[in-house]
Amino acid sequence: MKFVKFLVPTLLAVVLVFVLNTELKLGEIKVPPLGSLLSPFTGFWQNAEPKQINWDKDVKLDGLTGKVTVQYDSRRVPHIFAENEADLYYMQGYITAKDRLWQMEFITHVAAGRASELVGEVALKFDRTQRRKGLAYAADKAVSYINESPTSKLVMESYAAGVNAYIGSLTDASLPVEYKLINYKPELWTPFKTALLLKFMSDGLSGMDKDFEYTNALNLFGKEMVDLLYPDRSSGIDPIIPLGTAYNFPVEGIDTPLYEIPKGIFHSSIFDGPERENLGSNNWAVSGTRTNTGFPMLASDPHLGLNLPSIWYEIQLTAPGVNTYGATLPGSPCVIIGFNEDVAWGVTNAGMDVRDWYKIELVGEHKYRYEGEERSITYRYDTIRIKGGADYIDTIRFTHHGPVVYDERFPQKGNATPLALRWTALEPSNELMTFYTLNRAKGHADYLEALNYYFCPGQNFVFASHTGDIAIRQQGKFPKKWPEQGRYIMDGSSSKYEWQGYIPFEQNPYVLNPPRGFVSSTNQHPTDSTYPYYYAGYYEYDRSRRINELLGVDRKYTVDDMKQFQTDNYSYAAKDLLPFLLENLDTTNLEASHQEIYAMLKDWDYVYTANSKPATAFEMMFDTLMILVWDELQPYDEKALARPNAYVTIQFLKAQPNHDWVDHKSTEGKEDAAQLLNIAFKLGAENYLDWKANYGKEPEWWRYKNTTIAHWVPSLKAFSRQMVEIGGNRHILNATDGTHGASWRMVVSLEDNVKAWGVYPGGPSGNPGSHSYEPFIDAWAKGEYYELVFLKEPQQTEQIIFTQTFTK
């Protein structure tokens, strides 16, 4: 009996030791040994931070050449003061890594196609996709190109050295908690990783095309339907460059050949680009002649995926020749969106298509046909390391067009047609110098100089200066194309499908000090149809009309106006569709519950406030209507077909209510627009009532929308914030849906002593155990702002809560 009493706990102890020291598997994800994770000495307990900063006040770092002072304000924003540029960017790297190291490394692992190293074979297809797109290949070329500039080389290497100094200070106990959960350790940072991060942003913002979808639509439905469903330019647009602007510059002719589109059906791309209807950014600048201060005001709020830690990191950088403040990308030097004492700038996505696909005719294994000749293929052999498994070696072909993404080794749903990708993001570039120059800009000439470094992703750079200038330019390296070139998959064996050079930067869409007294962009078309170059892209139609309406009033604007406009919840889509729906609605036989919804919608002001119930009902009806109208596309779900956007859909229903495609194919008889609207109302009303019954709560918009600010690893829900009470929606200035929204809101008044306000949905720290992880979310959701502390030199004021000094 004594032996049994001894044996049972001994066996239990053995089992416990095994469990605590063995890597387990939860579904497809491997979990680290629980012993190390739960250890009181090195486990996640060590990541809890006190509310008050208690860091060392004096720190020695071998990589510095002089003294650096870092002051933290009451929101824990770092303000860095250095005696030279090398130390400035060294310290930016060090401080950013201190708060966001895991985020920086995780994003670059994802961009490089290295997720399998972290989570195992489940990520292999994703990693192969990333590598075949060529992001790492492009980053390699970018580093070589960047190193040709001594300035950018210094900045990149200094930043990397600072990151590595912080990595060198880490112990097992102080590792960010995500390293402990996924069971790996950080590797040294390099300029390549920074270049990779910038290419990752290019992928997110320009990595979209509809070539497969439009090619399929053309082959299935014909040219007339393609032009109806996917027009290059819809009526009623309000472009970035004011209507009627003259383009008085010489344009070289672009040859338009007779061309053919490859036949057949191309299946959905496995790496769909960003869903444009979920993305939206706004920026504008108002002339001092139209503000209450007499100085220009600038507003910028990029709408991106909502993540924790935030995609942005707020910072001030000061050294001889530079004093700048704003939002930075963790992993990249300089301020990306911000201001200095003289100027301010912001960006929105341009949306111009700079990514084309070419069908390749292979000749054997090592050749491809071009202009009747056989050209040699080059190869890149990528080794993908898989956690818990054997390495996978992928062989990627390259043609002069670019990487062959799809082939027999990597077919698209069984279709092994070789397809090569031509994309401006794969060309050498040095966007870093754009932001380096903007950070130091004194006026409009410096702004133009800065933009000349910028290639991809195309962005709308808004600008304002203390001296009174306002401007906007759509900047990027945009290919010259003949009409409709690049809308469809092209023949890679013929030179007539090649790009014919690039639009000169000075001929990109641009305006300085327009008579109307403001400039603005919301991802809409950059120009009207008189612009002499053909372009196509993915554009927004509603927010531009709203902001230009708000800024077009003859009055003096205030900073509070700028803030209110950024959080404006008025929907032009609802204004366009709801009256049309209600006037076609047969109300004679509506059920009592439906009558209540009808009355609610009839009194609605088209504003998506957080607590709006009519916004929820309308959205349910609109979603239903989109399905009813475009049911012709549903039989082709296995192929790539794009549903027309909301703006085109509304115009289509109004202009052609009896078109064959308006008919709902699953019913007997033929419906017209009025009948579909009635069906959409009734089904939407039922959805509204069902939601209310199922959840036992009023269907307020914020509850139904469920805006979630998710951790970069979505399965880590404990590190995410769900059900954020905020209004807004797609196609609204406050373009906040369930997963996307304003990632950084900034308003700058360029007075004699510049003033600025900002907020973002997160906090400075990337540590979920820190009080600084997500402290700004509630203010962001309410539309509140913080006045930004912009210092000219280190100060001891009530705004500064902690000061650190760093020396060699």
Image (spheres, grey):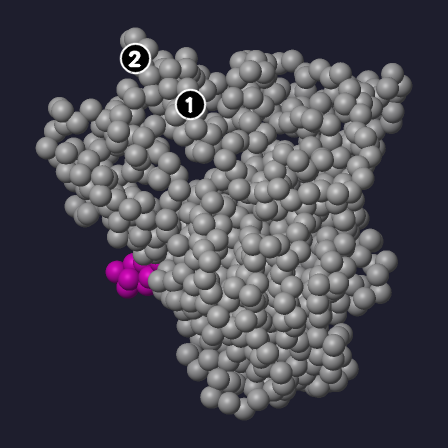
Position of residue 341 in the picture relative to residue 145 (left or right): left
- The answer to whether residue 184 is left or right of residue 407 is left
State how many labels appear: 2
- State the CA–CA distance, disc 1 to disc 2: 23 Å
Circle number at residue 125: none
x then y, percent, for residue 526:
61, 43
Q: Is residue 594 above or below residue 42?
A: above
Up-down relation of residue 226 to residue 107 (above or below)? above
Q: Position of residue 796 (x, y in %)?
A: 54, 91
Taking the image as drawn, is residue 627 in sight?
Answer: yes
Q: Quadrant of the N terminus?
A: bottom left
The part of the chain drawn in magenta is 1-12
Q: Find disc 1 in the rendering and name its residue.
A: 655
- Which of these two is toward me, 594 or 558? 558
Image location (x, y in percent) of residue 484:
67, 26
Q: In which image quadrant can residue 691 be found?
A: top left
Residue type (three-letter) at the residue carrying disc 2: Thr
Q: Residue at position x 65%, y 70% from top?
A: 467
Magenta residues, dominant SS class = helix
Q: Amino acid at mark 1?
A: Ala
* Residue at x 32%, y 38% (from the top left corner): 619
Say which residue label 2 marks: 667
Q: Earlier in the sequence, mark 1 or mark 2?
A: 1
For mark 1, give the secondary structure. Answer: helix
Assess disc 1: are there few (<14), some (14-19) or many (≥20) residues with their C-alpha within 10 Å of its C-alpha. Answer: few
